[in-house]
Image: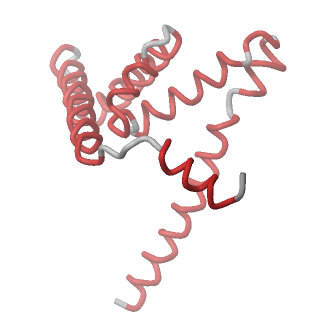
Amino acid sequence: MDRKEYDQMAEELKPGGHKVKNGFNAFLYGGVMGAIAQGVLEFFMNVYNCSEKDAIPMMTITLVFVACLLTGLGLYDSIAKHAGAGTFIPITGFANSMASSALDSKSEGLVMGIGSNMFKLGGTVITYGIVSASLLGVIRYVITLFG
């Protein structure tokens, strides 16, 4: 089989794109997740009678816990299959990546398995997040300096 035949066969077997459907699902699921987060925030503000500033960390911890729990139960991936990019709200997506890396390595033990492999994907996210935030900070500084 030459390159041309291979490219033709690969093109025929490539799954069709459902961009509108995928975009709608991401919008819908992301919106539902955002509404749930807002509901959790309102719950903490009203039940514990605290300010929004104090309730935000509690809501964030709750979202991380729920994402890790759903990952551990094997439900996060099935939700993500339907929601697509809608599950990529940064805090829940990051919690899922950390929990799934840890679960994949649990057979190797607590230290050499879970402890050393937990940040496999998370380390990349943290690194590029810090680099991009630093670059954007420099750009903003330059704009305000000359603006």
Could you tell me residue 10's position as x and y percent?
Answer: 56, 48
Which residue occupies the foreground of this view, 42 or 85? 85
Spot occupied by residue 35 in the image (x, y as percentages of width and height): 19, 30
Residue in the foreground of this view, choosing between 26 and 47: 26
| Residue located at (50% from left, 42% from top) | 13
Task: Give residue 64's position: percent from left, percent from top.
Answer: 44, 24
Where is residue 95? Give x, y as percent.
Answer: 51, 28
**In the drawing, does residue 118 fall left or right of residue 145?**
right
Residue at position x 46%, y 22% from top? 77
Residue at point 71%, 57% (across, down): 2
The foreground one among 10 and 97 is 10
Image quarter of residue 113 = top right
Q: Residue furthest bottom?
A: 146
Q: On screen, 49 above or below 13?
A: above
* Residue pictured at 75% horizontal, 22% vertical: 115
Tell me: residue 77, above or below residue 10. above
In this view, 126 is above or below 52: below
Position of the C terminus, as image quadrant, is bottom left
Q: How is the image coloured?
A: secondary structure
**Picture quadrant where residue 109 is located:** top right
Q: Which quadrant would residue 49 be assigned to in this image? A: top left
Viewed as shown, does residue 63 lie left or right of 128?
A: left
Q: How many marks?
A: 0
Residue 80 or 46: which is nearer the viewer? Answer: 80
